[in-house]
Image (cartoon, helix red, strand yellow):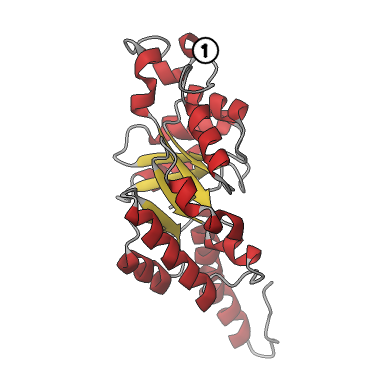
Amino acid sequence: MWACSGSPLVAEICAGSGLDWLLIDAEHSPNGLESLLAQLQAVAGYPIVPVVRPPVLDPVIIKQYLDLGAQNLLIPMVDTADDARLAVSSIHYPPRGMRGVGSALARASRWNRIDNYLDRAGDFLSVTVQIESTTAVANLRDITAVDGVSAVFIGPSDLAASMGLLGQQDHPDVVDVVERCIRTVASFGKPVGVNAFAEPLARRYLAAGADFILVGADVALLARGSEQLATAYINDAENTRPGSAPTQSY
């Protein structure tokens, strides 16, 4: 599920849920370095895999996230094989990549308490690239083939928008493209995932071969849950009072 609130407490609650993985998002959420660090610390004691999404494919931002101790990155808006290569290069030290060296100062190496961290850092890291445009779909085989890409994640929301179907993630054309992408990535033997909040779509994508899915978000669960409480205890009660007019909630 997504952790979008920026709250370490909420992230910890989600981490103890029994789910497999938690995406701590900084692309569409109010997260900075300090809140990301606090959330990584909060979930560290739980059997869940934290994945962090930066707001953009930027080697400097990625360097900071890695130094905080993020080990699994989901890189948004990867449209080409060159984008994928940049993502891979950003997580590795030279000579394989361009990650800046500051491990002695960083949580990632436990402040130089991990033996030979500089030589072994790549063993602890994964980079998942996000496919969310028609350009990315056209380049999917080349993107997936990039050495060092650990997995591919499909974002139907932006993909639908790029197809001229804004807000229609469940449109048959979008679903068809997503399923074709799943099959393409699977043919390379790499894990493939997809965002699918609607359960019928989530089940369909799993049946199509998706290896991992995102099916909920902390803020969405809180929004819908609080609305249900309002419906049950406020709106219904107001409507049953003598002489009261129906109320409308926005």
In the displayed structure, 186 sits above or below 25; it is below
Locate residue 25, reporting x and y percent.
54, 44
Q: Taking the image as drawn, is residue 124 in sight?
A: yes
Locate residue 44, reporting x and y percent.
36, 32
193 or 96: nearer the viewer:
96
Indicate left or right for 241 with 127 as reference. right
- Kind of residue indicated by mark 1: Gly
Query: Which residue is at 34% across, 10% downward?
Result: 116
Locate residue 157, reporting x and y percent.
57, 62
Indicate left or right for 60 with 11 as reference. right
Query: Which residue is at 47% across, 19% downward?
Result: 93
Locate residue 143, reporting x and y percent.
48, 46
User: Mark 1 packing: few (<14 Cα in 10 Å), some, or many (20+)?
Assistant: some
Indicate left or right for 63 with 205 as reference. right
95 or 55: nearer the viewer:
95
In the displayed structure, 210 sits above or below 238; it is above
Query: Which residue is at 33% across, 26% downward?
Result: 123
146 or 70: nearer the viewer:
146
Q: Which residue is mark 1?
A: 102
Give the position of the C terminus as an image quadrant.
bottom right
Q: Taking the image as drawn, is residue 10 in sight?
A: no
Q: Residue furthest bottom?
A: 243
Query: Which residue is at 40% across, 70% downward?
Result: 199
- Tag count in the figure? 1
In the displayed structure, 86 sits above or below 135; it is above
15 or 84: nearer the viewer:
84
In the displayed structure, 114 sits above or below 65; it is above
Dot 1 lies on which element?
A: loop
Q: Quadrant of residue 245?
A: bottom right
